[in-house]
Image (tube, rainbow, N blue to C red):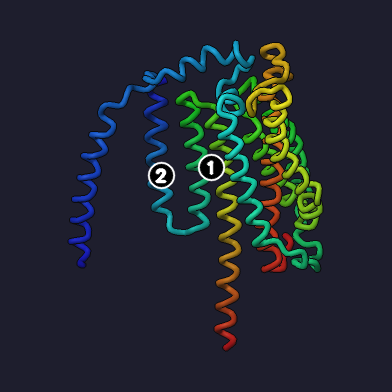
């Protein structure tokens, strides 16, 4: 097929796509004019029912908590798969200290790491009050630790992130979510019922199981991304034989 | 505010084209990261701060990081293969 014909066929397909696209979006409601009933119901009732000011987290960790449990285990199993395929205890045993960063980089990274750590913890614990929550906070906490690799070298990064405690925390976070869900059975209530005291709206220790589940998810996501980052880096370092 | 909405949509469109048009893979990952950041700003402008936070964490940081690490590994393997072929 010649180039000219290829371009002609592309324009034909593009025109067809443009027509269908126009037809599809023509009758969409304008921005901010949501037609379904659930959004308005949730926005008005979640503050009174669950004492949360962030409706998204009330939905994620309570109203549709079972779906989120499944999503959490998707992350858990995929990280488990990466570990099974790539991790090898014999890898990079003889890596010597390489990559010496300048003092300015190390100083800057240490300061940023402290700030990011506080921000990540804030995100994880304030999910029920402001936008954020366990997942976002966990990713922030895990990616912040990449600064250790930048400021120091692979050996320091390895000592912190490949510790067995990280694996235990990953399992603890995933199991904690399920355990909180199961604990409702003690009160003869359905799975994932919000039985904990709801507290005062706007307080850090409010919203019952939502805050507890958010913390569990934060733990799981932090540990999972730490292990993922370490295993990927290990692949490169063991291949290239460089730690910096 | 309505100007911001159109502006950010336009920017997202242009950046998406830029990501596709970038040929060098390392540059493309950086472009992808910038695109993820712009998407997060777009979500924020359209009043979805929760989604914006997830987008920053995953689209602008975690995904480019993974792709970058995978690329570094692949580049090294292909270099080694080249060396082996030259030695033969």
Identify residue for label 2.
B16
Labels 1 and 2 share a subunit: yes
**Quadrant the N terminus of chain A occupies:** bottom left
Q: Position of residue A130 (x, y in %)?
A: 62, 22
Q: Position of residue A7 (x, y in %)?
A: 22, 57
Q: Where is residue A199 in the image (x, y as percent from the top left)?
A: 72, 13
Q: Position of residue A206 (x, y in %)?
A: 70, 17
Give the residue at x 60% y 13%: A49
**Which of A104 and A145 lies nearest the eye of the viewer?**
A145
Give the residue at x 75% y 46%: A104
Give the residue at x 52% y 52%: B29
**Which of A29 and A236 lies nearest the eye of the viewer?**
A29
Residue A118 is left or right of residue A10, and the answer is: right
Above or below, A29 relative to A241? above
**Letter of the chain that mark 1 sits on in the rendering:** B
Residue A45 is left or right of residue A113, and the answer is: left
Residue that protrudes farthest toward the front in the picture? A188
Above or below, B46 relative to B59? above
Which badge, 1 or 2, comes first in the chain's sequence?
2
At label 2, counting other C-alpha atoms closer than 10 Å, the crowd grade (few under 14, some 14-19, many 20 or more) is: some
Q: Distance between the residues labelled 1 and 2?
A: 13 Å
- Identify the mark at residue A27; answer none if there is no mark: none
- Circle 1: element type: helix
Residue A11 is left or right of residue A73, and the answer is: left
**Letter of the chain that mark 2 sits on in the rendering:** B
Identify residue for label 1.
B59
**Which of B22 and A191 lies nearest the eye of the viewer?**
A191
Determine if residue A108 is in view.
Answer: yes
Determine if residue A124 is in view.
Answer: no
- Circle 2: element type: helix
């Amino acid at each position: 097929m010649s180039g000219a014909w290829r371009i002609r066929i592309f324009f034909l397909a593009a025109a067809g796509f443009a027509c269908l696209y126009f037809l599809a979006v023509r009758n969409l409601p304008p921005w901010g004019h949501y037609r379904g009933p659930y959004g308005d119901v949730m926005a008005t009732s979640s503050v009174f029912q669950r004492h949360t000011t962030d409706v998204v987290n009330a939905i994620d960790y309570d109203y549709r908590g079972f779906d989120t449990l499944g999503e959490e285990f998707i992350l858990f199993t995929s990280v488990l798969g990466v570990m099974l395929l790539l991790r090898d205890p014999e890898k990079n045993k003889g890596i010597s200290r390489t990559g010496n960063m300048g003092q300015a980089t190390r100083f800057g990274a240490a300061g940023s790491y402290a700030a990011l750590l506080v921000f990540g913890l804030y995100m994880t614990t304030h999910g029920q009050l402001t936008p954020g929550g366990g997942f976002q906070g966990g990713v922030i906490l895990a990616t912040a630790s990449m600064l250790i690799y930048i400021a120091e070298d692979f050996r320091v990064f390895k000592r912190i992130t490949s510790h067995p405690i990280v694996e235990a925390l990953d399992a603890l976070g995933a199991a904690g979510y399920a355990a909180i869900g199961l604990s409702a059975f003690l009160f003869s209530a359905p799975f994932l019922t919000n039985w904990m005291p709801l507290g005062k709206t706007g307080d850090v220790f409010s919203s019952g199981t939502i805050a507890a589940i958010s913390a569990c998810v934060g733990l799981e996501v932090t540990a999972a991304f730490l292990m993922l980052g370490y295993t990927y880096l290990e692949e490169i370092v063991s291949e290239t034989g460089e730690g910096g | 505010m309505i100007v911001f909405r159109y502006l950010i949509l336009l920017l997202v469109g242009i950046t998406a084209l830029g990501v596709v048009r970038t040929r060098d893979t390392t540059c493309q990952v950086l472009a992808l990261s910038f695109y993820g950041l712009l998407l997060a700003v777009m979500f924020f402008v359209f009043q979805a701060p929760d989604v914006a936070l997830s987008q920053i964490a995953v689209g602008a940081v975690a995904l480019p990081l993974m792709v970058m690490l995978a690329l570094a590994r692949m580049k090294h393997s292909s270099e080694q293969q080249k060396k082996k072929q030259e030695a033969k």
